Amino acid sequence: MQRPFAGFVIASFAFASPPAAAQGGGNLLLVCNNARDGPAFAAASYPFGDGWVSEGWFEIADGACTYFEIGGESDVPFEGVAYYFAYTQNYIWDGRYDVCVTPTPDAEFRIFASDWSSCNSGFEHRGFDEVYVRAGYAEVALTPSR
């Protein structure tokens, strides 16, 4: 689900040719800030071993992209669901999947968990949206609609 602070927002997903790192076994989720609303702050969650990783508050400048390396250290391309949350000054891209994050948007974090049913002290749940990763690569474009 994408909801604006003001207006309507969409996120588009692309499954273009993966970059060389993904083709060589690296698994990547690319998040691009096309909002034209200043920097975006993004977090992602993905399977890792017997649990999940949540990491983020990576700043993405207007018109720029950042990669999340997902799926752990495997030579096999990841196939499955990953999750993301992002926001700018006026827009938010979120969903219905609760994931633990640090509430401090300017602090990078990385959390390992077996599930997200509860958060440790100092963390909070945010609603993440899902994206399907194919052949180790997925792309999310943070784009407001007109």
Image (tube, rainbow, N blue to C red):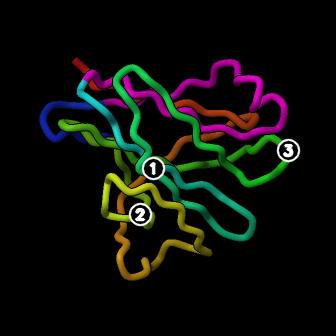
- Circle on res. 101: 2
Q: Position of residue 54 (x, y in %)?
A: 53, 60
As helix, strand or loop, the secondary structure at mark 3 comes to loop
Q: Position of residue 46 (x, y in %)?
A: 60, 55
Crowding at dot 1, Cα within 10 Å, few <14 / some 14-19 / many 20+, comes out as many
From the viewer's perspective, is residue 47 above or below residue 59? below
> Residue under circle 1?
43
Q: Pick whichever of labels 2 and 3 is earlier in the sequence.
A: 3
As helix, strand or loop, the secondary structure at mark 1 comes to strand
Q: Pick whichever of labels 1 and 3 is earlier in the sequence.
A: 1
- The quarter holding residue 40 reads top left
Residue kind at label 3, given as amino acid type: Val
Q: Please tell me whether residue 12 belongs to the stretch shown in magenta.
A: yes
Q: Please tell me whether residue 32 belongs to the stretch shown in magenta.
A: yes
Q: Alpha carbon of mark 2 to alpha carbon of mark 3: how far?
A: 28 Å
Toward the viewer: 89 or 2? 89
- The residue at 58%/49% (across/down) is 82
Crowding at dot 2, Cα within 10 Å, few <14 / some 14-19 / many 20+, comes out as many
Q: Alpha carbon of mark 1 to alpha carbon of mark 3: how far?
A: 23 Å
Residue kind at label 2, given as amino acid type: Val
> Residue under circle 3?
76
Residue kind at label 1, given as amino acid type: Ala
Which segment is the magenta one? 10-36
- The residue at 80%/40% (across/down) is 77
From the viewer's perspective, is residue 114 above or below residue 54? below
- Circle on res. 114: none
- The quarter holding residue 90 reads top left
Crowding at dot 3, Cα within 10 Å, few <14 / some 14-19 / many 20+, comes out as some
Q: Pick whichever of labels 2 and 1 is earlier in the sequence.
A: 1
